[in-house]
Image (tube, coloured by chain):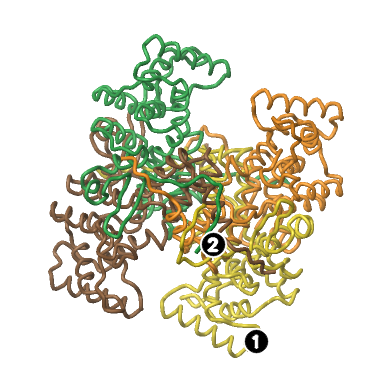
Chain colours: A green, B brown, C orange, D yellow
Amino acid sequence: MTTFDTDMPPMTTSIGRSTADDIWVQGYDLAGELMGEVDFGSVFYLLITGRLPTAGEARIFNAVLVALADHGLTPTALAARLTYTGAPDAIQGAIAAGVLGAGSVFLGVFEDAGRVLTAAGPTPDTGEEELERMAAEIIEDHRGRGARIPGLGHPFHKGGDPRTARLLALAREHDLLGPHTRLMLRVQERATSPSGRQLALNAGGACGALLSDLAIDTAVLRGVAVVSRAAGVVGHLAEEARAPMGRTLWHMAERAATYEARR
Amino acid sequence: MTTFDTDMPPMTTSIGRSTADDIWVQGYDLAGELMGEVDFGSVFYLLITGRLPTAGEARIFNAVLVALADHGLTPTALAARLTYTGAPDAIQGAIAAGVLGAGSVFLGVFEDAGRVLTAAGPTPDTGEEELERMAAEIIEDHRGRGARIPGLGHPFHKGGDPRTARLLALAREHDLLGPHTRLMLRVQERATSPSGRQLALNAGGACGALLSDLAIDTAVLRGVAVVSRAAGVVGHLAEEARAPMGRTLWHMAERAATYEARR
Amino acid sequence: MTTFDTDMPPMTTSIGRSTADDIWVQGYDLAGELMGEVDFGSVFYLLITGRLPTAGEARIFNAVLVALADHGLTPTALAARLTYTGAPDAIQGAIAAGVLGAGSVFLGVFEDAGRVLTAAGPTPDTGEEELERMAAEIIEDHRGRGARIPGLGHPFHKGGDPRTARLLALAREHDLLGPHTRLMLRVQERATSPSGRQLALNAGGACGALLSDLAIDTAVLRGVAVVSRAAGVVGHLAEEARAPMGRTLWHMAERAATYEARR
Amino acid sequence: MTTFDTDMPPMTTSIGRSTADDIWVQGYDLAGELMGEVDFGSVFYLLITGRLPTAGEARIFNAVLVALADHGLTPTALAARLTYTGAPDAIQGAIAAGVLGAGSVFLGVFEDAGRVLTAAGPTPDTGEEELERMAAEIIEDHRGRGARIPGLGHPFHKGGDPRTARLLALAREHDLLGPHTRLMLRVQERATSPSGRQLALNAGGACGALLSDLAIDTAVLRGVAVVSRAAGVVGHLAEEARAPMGRTLWHMAERAATYEARR
């Protein structure tokens, strides 16, 4: 028997529980109520928020997961492939390497957009004038600090990211274009680049806004993107197992780099 | 201009490609054909196999992902929570820590079952007698090496894992109980524990067999479980952000452990 | 032959190079000049800075690495052990899980102290009065933002961290108590907690200041701590392989936690 | 108060312990006996084995750590750099990505060599004839399975790895060429490639043998290489922060790869 006093906060959880006959996830009977009944994206939503999504919410949440799953031979996909070259026996490590690049530069915009919008605090009852005021404040605050507004502009899809238009259309179709996304759109309409050009709403900004409307906590916003990207990474590793490029990348890098001793 | 000779194999990919206006995933227009049209689980299947699943395949693949997403306060969930305690600013690291425990002891059974079945090589045309022979060989081979057959037995759900029954029912409903799963069931019927007891087919064994029937390459079988488990881990981290247990675990471990200097 | 134009910056490296007969590290012959001649800590310094440390610098750099290697059953050690429970076949994953907790809460203070001191920009020529002014500015800036000054105070070693005194004594002995550390000490002398109490310089603050004096780039300051902590993690894993506590931790957590369904 | 019965094994640790005034590592006073007195490599040895190395053991252990720290722009260094490109704010993640490639293909040889030698079980008292017999058995066993003997041959340093000669010379100098290394040398003398060519002892084989003689548990053999390689990775990241090549690698890969849709 281990007995000890603890002045630490008690530990509580609502996620999972098993008995000899049943497994429960967020209060649902896993085998009886979820498997075969609810798609994986919706169960992911349940795991994070504690409730199943409505049909419209499920469609948008799935669309966000689909939108972020892959973008070709990105640094994260390459890092995963190069890790697999050395450790094909431990694919969990290659997947981990792939998601560890989901930091401030790439998937961070996603989280940053959600934070800015959530901090402004719009609700379903926020009127148009008030949204206008919030948008002006966000723009002014970023301009004052010389900071880029997260979610606007794209280095590549300058005419507008095709994922953004699709996500907004889906949200409108289900009447789920909520206060965070409406605020984001107002910011986009009014903000301009330093050179005066209007900036498109990129997929990261749209996803961050829509997930905030879906009540995803900003603390795990980046986590949604990480799971989505993990699926893309496994796709790359399936291809790497079949048609490897890791060693070619390695030798290409060695030959392309110039060696300059500092000694 | 960088020019170099390379005797390395050429690099080819079929996964992702972008133009200024479009993003393609495995030959599909991401925004036009996948987002809002196909659930995330099915796109994950597309990323790995290069084709979209049929309706029945999608239901089974999603059910497998749902089955493996969470099992409560497991070592992997705890590792993720303890990592978040130290680095809440980099949630991708806590998720990575969570999936790195998906090794030989827990999710490995999954992959091992798939390997054993795939190595036997049953096809849709394999007759009953031939399956019988394959099953006998698998049992004999493991008995000869004193090895446990992967996929059989469970330390906790001794009466049968509720997930297994559900998965098999789904496969039968869609007429997708293929040769790998039929072989697995024959092995289960004939195998006994060293003490002569019959062993139940566990969820790992059922998932490994069904995914092999769904043509998932054994090289990435564990990767499917990792993505599923990543979703569960994000669920735990959302809870950890709201109601932390990391520090309590830490102090509980420090107090429960006995210090025994070796010097 | 692969030929392509690239408008990307060229790739240069000074770290490693191999010929059929020799291996070079930062311009040194690895087998002839480093192995057996220089300790590992000094080679680590060489890898980061491009030059070998002097005898005094090597002693301080090694002392910093030794100081941060272990602190008992910390969350990072526990995360590594729990990961090993699931994946003993891939120890690199358990080590990775262990270092992923080296984020803002624990080892981050280290980096934050370095950043604050480096931003102030003291040099060997900075006079006492100027240091005084820099210290006052740092204190005022943090007080204005209601922020804690990194490197001061310790939740446990309230009388002063024993590592701090030792590090400072070593630096004085070798006449290597440079401008960043002198500035840190001035900040410590003048700063008080909100309740007016004087705060001790903790080991993170001392290490961050000393490493800045040793010309370690702030971008990799946390990396020094990570390598040190990786050694401690391998120590824990060697013990875990011999006398496991992972499963006990798991069951302890399951029993101590209260399950509260949200449904 | 948390009270619970547990039938789990008790948790014991000998590694670290703190009081308000002191910090203990493996029974040593960290500040008083280790910092400034013992180099980092030797403390790493203490953390793993529970005792400080002798002067000769410390020199060899440090030489092994130095030997494995870097090998230029390897897949692991590239994976770390590409991860840093996306997440410069979380350098612990880039280091983790770098070490996750330390699997079966690269650093695994190290561990495999140690396992083969340890399984044979030579001791300081094992005579020459007995060593001869063990070597013959190892060779026969691998030939019978058509397997490569770990530690022999190198794709690049065909004339002999310069690190091997240096390590053996150091071991002879300190009279620490123990039974595992003597067995490894006998295996090397007698083994030939399938084409009848003699194979050189590579650095992985030499390190695995020497560390086994130094009583490092095979369970953490790969962990020694991981810590060493982590230092090399931080060297690469310091360079990447100063002179990045991540984006160049990315664009190089995108341009060099051929896109072949499977649809």
Label 1 sits on residue? D125
Q: Between marks 2 and 1, how big is the CA–CA gap?
A: 30 Å
Q: Earlier in the sequence, mark 2 or mark 1?
A: 2
Chain ID of residue with mark 2: D
Which amino acid does the dot numbered 2 rest on? Leu
Residue at mark 2: D107
Q: Is residue B162 left or right of residue D40?
A: left
Q: Residue furthest top?
A: A129
Q: Describe the element under mark 2 as helix, strand or loop.
A: loop
Quadrant in which the C terminus of chain D is drawn: top left
Q: Residue furthest front?
A: D1
| Residue B69 visible in rendering | yes
The residue sitting at 22% across, 63% down in the picture is: B180
- Do labels 2 and 1 touch, CB within 8 Å? no
Q: Nearer the viewer, residue C158 or A129?
A: C158
Height in image: C139 above or below D137?
Answer: above
Does B40 sit above or below residue D74? above
Up the image or down, C190 lies above or below C232; here it is above
Amino acid identity at mark 1: Asp
Nearest to viewer (mark 2 / mark 1): 1
Coordinates of residue B82 in the picture (x, y in percent): 51, 48
Question: Is A126 positioned to the left or the right of D52 in the image?
Answer: left
Query: In the rendering, at what x and y percent does residue C156 appear?
Result: 67, 46
Q: How many marks?
A: 2
